Image (cartoon, helix red, strand yellow):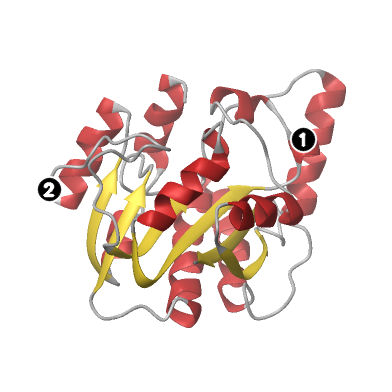
Amino acid sequence: MDRIVYDRMAAHDSTHWWYRARRDILADYLTRYAALPSPARILEIGCGTGHNLPMLAGFGEVDAIEIDPAAREIASERLGKPVGDAPLPELTGVPRGHYDLIAVLDVVEHIEDDVAALAAMRACLAPGGKILIAVPAHQWMWSAHDTVNHHHRRYSKATLKAAIEQAGLKTEKLGYFNSLLFPLAAAARIAGRMSGRDDSDDSPPPGPVNALFERIFRLERHLVGRVPMTPGVSIVTLAKP
């Protein structure tokens, strides 16, 4: 990712509506569907500045990997121990057959060979282990945001499921999320494309709007996995061997 993406993440990951509500949604999703042992052995790959690590720590002992040095330093402070730097798809030095949960949250789209990356993660799972995957949805929504984040693709449910199955895994509870705000996001992408003002700035909106978006998005914690969601900005699933 471009340096500015990590800088914005560090500045806003504790206040931006998207980060805050998504953590709550994913925590509820894991609680309901992951069936993790207590405590679980957890690895987050591509942890960025470590903003998901406290949430994941609620389920067990967490290790993490981040290839960007500056983001890795921030994440290590948050985790209280060194964060690794093993890249995908190799995951050199990461123990095989060890983890009850591997979390890759908006990471797989950054990897050119997503199938090889998922297969490497599968090898690191303990018996009964699962991978929590979240990715951006809809290739037609491609924008400057995807470019500065160095994405290789956005996914449909079908293309994500196909990559997971090619890696020797099966999906559970695969579906969209960030659906309630999807009409606004789609309209903004289309308007930006038509006006030629496609903007990669993902800084939070003004305070009242930020708070409103957070409340709306957080409502999905009661819906994701329980009911079929309408198209959303993202897709989430659990994958298991």
User: Could you say where residue 151 lies in the image, as x and y percent from the top left?
Assistant: 59, 31
What's the residue type where badge 1 is placed? Arg
Residue farthest along the top direction in this orientation: 196
Residue positioned 35% across, 34% down in the render: 87
| Secondary-structure class at tag 1 | helix
Reading the image, the residue beneath label 1 is 189
- Which amino acid does the dot numbered 2 rest on? Lys
Residue 221: give x, y in percent of width and height.
56, 72
Q: Quadrant of residue 186?
A: top right
- The structure residue drawn at horizontal position 75% and vertical position 55%, both measured from the top left corner, is 158
Residue 76, quarter of picture: top left
Q: Name the residue: 41% across, 40% down.
A: 12
Query: Which residue is the site of mark 2?
Result: 81
Q: Is residue 208 left or right of residue 160?
A: left
Residue 139 tag number: none
Residue 67 lies, with reference to residue 126, above or below; the image says above
Picture residue at 75% right of the left edge, 20% below the top: 197
Q: Position of residue 79 (x, y in %)?
A: 19, 51
